[in-house]
C-alpha cells in the first residue's frame, strides 16, 4: 500500500510520520515554498482569551499533541518543542472576574491559575487590571521542526520537490500504482481542481521579531498581542489578521499595528529587527476540513487548521487515518461533507 502526500507543512509532515508508524508506504511532494507553517510562531495555547473558553477539542488534543512532538524530537534527534508559562495581562475588570471564576473550576484549573501574591508583574509591563497564569504554553520552533523532518524524508528517499501533477496522480490511482492521495496544501488548495470549491479561506498574518535590551524573560506575555521570548533579548510579537489576502509581502501598516499593540503591553523601548508574513488556511466555521472527495475516490484532504494548527494537527491526522484505514466515521464538525459543495 502506498500513499502520496501533497504538501509538507505541519499537516503533511505529521501525516507522513503517522503513515510510517502504521507501516504504510508514502511519498511526499512539496513545492519547497511554505507560506504558513514556516513563519508561524508555533504557539500551543490551551485557552481563548476573548471569553476565556478552552480551545475547541482541547481535552482530546492537548496530551496527544505534546506526546507527538516530544516523540518526533527523539526520532529526529532535534530540539524544537519548548514549554513555557504565559502571563496574561487582563484587558478589563470583567476579564479579571472571568479568570477568578474559571480558576475555581476543575475543567479549567489544569490549564490556568493565579500567580502567588508574592509575585509582582515585571516593571516593564503596563499592568492595569492584574494578570493570570496560563500554566503551560508550548512552542514549536517551526523552522527547525520542518527542516529536520524534510532532511529525514530526503534521506529516506520519501520526498520530491515540485508542484503536484493532479492528472498524473489520478492516472497512477487508476493504474493501481498508488492507493491514495492526501492533499495538505494550505491556502494553495485554490489551485487544486478536485477540492478548490471547498471554502479554504486565506488569512494573512504578519509577525515581528523585536529586540528589547536588558529583558531576558522566559515567559510569554499576552494582551492584544503575544510576546514570545526566543533568546538573546529577542522576542516574536504578533500577529495581524488580514482576511482574504494572499500577498506575501510585509507592510508598514502591519508593522505599526503590531508595534502599537506591543506598546500597550510594555513600557520600554524595543527595536524591530525582522518582519515576516504568511498565509493561514482557515474555514468559515473555524474548523478543520477532512475527508474523501465524494466522486474521486481515494483522494483526500486535510486542511483549514487555522491559528490553532499546531494543537489540532496531531488529532486531525489520527482522525483522518482512522477514517481511511479503519473506517471510522469523521466527526461531523470536521467532515468536508458539511459544506455540500463537491
Image (cartoon, rainbow, N blue to C red):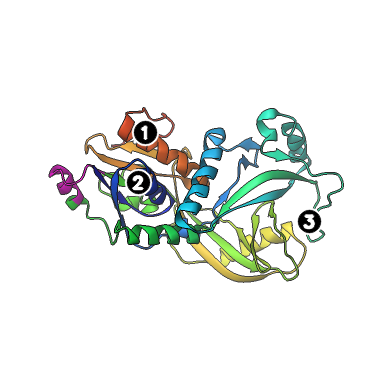
Q: CA distance from mark 2 to mark 3?
A: 48 Å
Q: Inspect the magenta stretch and tell me whether residue 211 lies in it.
A: no
Choose top left, top right, bottom left or bottom right for residue 338: top left
Q: Foreground mark, 2 or 3? A: 2
Q: Residue at x 68, y 68 (%)?
A: 233
Counting from the top left corner in percent of width and height, residue 144 is at 49, 61
Q: Inspect the magenta stretch and tell me whether residue 174 lies in it.
A: yes
| Residue labelled with disc 3 | 126
Counting from the top left corner in percent of width and height, residue 116 is at 83, 44
Q: Nearer the viewer, residue 261 or 8?
A: 8
What secondary structure is found at the residue carrying circle 2?
Answer: helix
Asked whether the viewer can see residue 307, the reply is no
Q: Residue at x 41, y 38 (%)?
A: 318
Q: Residue at x 52, y 65 (%)?
A: 276
Q: CA distance from mark 3 to mark 1?
A: 48 Å
| Residue labelled with disc 2 | 20
Disc on res. 298 = none
| Residue labelled with disc 1 | 322
What secondary structure is found at the residue carrying circle 3?
Answer: loop
Question: Magenta segment range?
Answer: 169-180
Q: Nearer the viewer, residue 299 or 238?
A: 299
Above or below, 95 against 184 in this view is: above
What secondary structure is found at the residue carrying circle 1?
Answer: helix
Q: Quadrant of the N terminus?
A: top left
Amino acid at each position: 500500500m502506498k500513499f502520496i502526500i501533497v504538501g509538507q507543512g505541519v499537516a503533511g509532515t505529521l501525516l507522513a510520520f503517522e503513515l510510517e508508524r502504521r507501516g504504510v508506504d508514502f511519498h511526499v511532494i512539496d513545492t519547497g515554498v511554505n507560506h504558513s507553517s514556516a513563519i508561524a510562531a508555533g504557539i500551543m495555547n490551551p485557552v481563548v482569551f476573548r471569553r476565556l473558553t478552552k480551545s475547541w477539542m482541547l481535552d482530546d488534543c492537548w496530551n496527544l499533541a505534546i506526546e507527538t512532538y516530544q516523540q518526533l524530537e527523539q526520532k529526529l534527534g532535534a530540539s524544537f518543542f519548548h514549554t513555557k508559562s504565559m502571563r496574561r495581562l487582563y484587558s478589563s475588570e470583567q476579564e479579571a472576574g472571568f479568570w477568578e471564576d474559571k480558576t475555581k473550576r476543575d475543567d479549567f484549573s489544569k490549564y490556568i491559575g493565579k500567580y502567588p501574591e508574592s509575585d509582582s508583574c515585571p516593571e516593564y509591563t503596563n499592568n492595569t487590571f492584574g494578570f493570570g497564569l496560563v500554566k503551560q504554553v508550548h512552542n514549536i520552533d517551526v523552522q527547525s521542526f520542518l527542516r529536520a523532518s524534510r532532511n529525514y524524508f530526503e534521506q529516506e528517499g520519501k520526498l520530491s520537490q515540485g508542484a503536484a501533477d493532479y492528472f498524473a496522480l489520478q492516472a497512477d490511482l487508476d493504474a493501481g500504482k498508488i492507493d491514495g492521495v492526501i492533499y495538505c496544501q494550505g491556502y494553495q488548495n485554490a489551485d487544486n481542481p478536485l477540492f478548490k470549491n471547498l471554502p479554504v479561506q486565506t488569512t494573512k498574518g504578519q509577525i515581528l521579531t523585536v529586540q528589547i535590551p536588558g529583558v531576558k524573560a522566559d515567559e510569554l506575555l499576552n494582551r492584544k498581542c503575544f510576546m514570545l521570548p526566543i533568546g538573546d533579548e529577542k522576542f516574536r510579537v504578533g500577529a495581524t489578521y488580514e482576511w482574504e489576502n494572499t500577498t506575501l509581502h510585509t507592510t508598514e501598516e502591519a508593522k505599526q499595528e503590531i508595534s502599537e499593540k506591543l506598546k500597550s503591553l510594555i513600557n520600554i523601548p524595543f527595536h524591530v529587527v525582522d518582519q515576516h508574513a504568511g498565509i493561514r488556511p482557515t474555514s468559515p466555521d473555524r474548523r478543520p476540513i477532512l475527508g474523501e472527495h465524494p466522486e474521486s475516490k481515494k483522494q483526500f484532504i486535510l486542511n483549514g487548521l487555522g491559528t490553532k494548527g499546531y494543537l489540532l494537527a496531531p488529532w486531525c491526522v489520527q482522525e483522518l487515518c482512522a477514517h481511511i484505514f479503519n473506517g471510522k466515521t469523521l466527526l461531523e464538525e470536521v467532515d468536508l461533507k458539511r459544506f455540500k459543495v463537491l
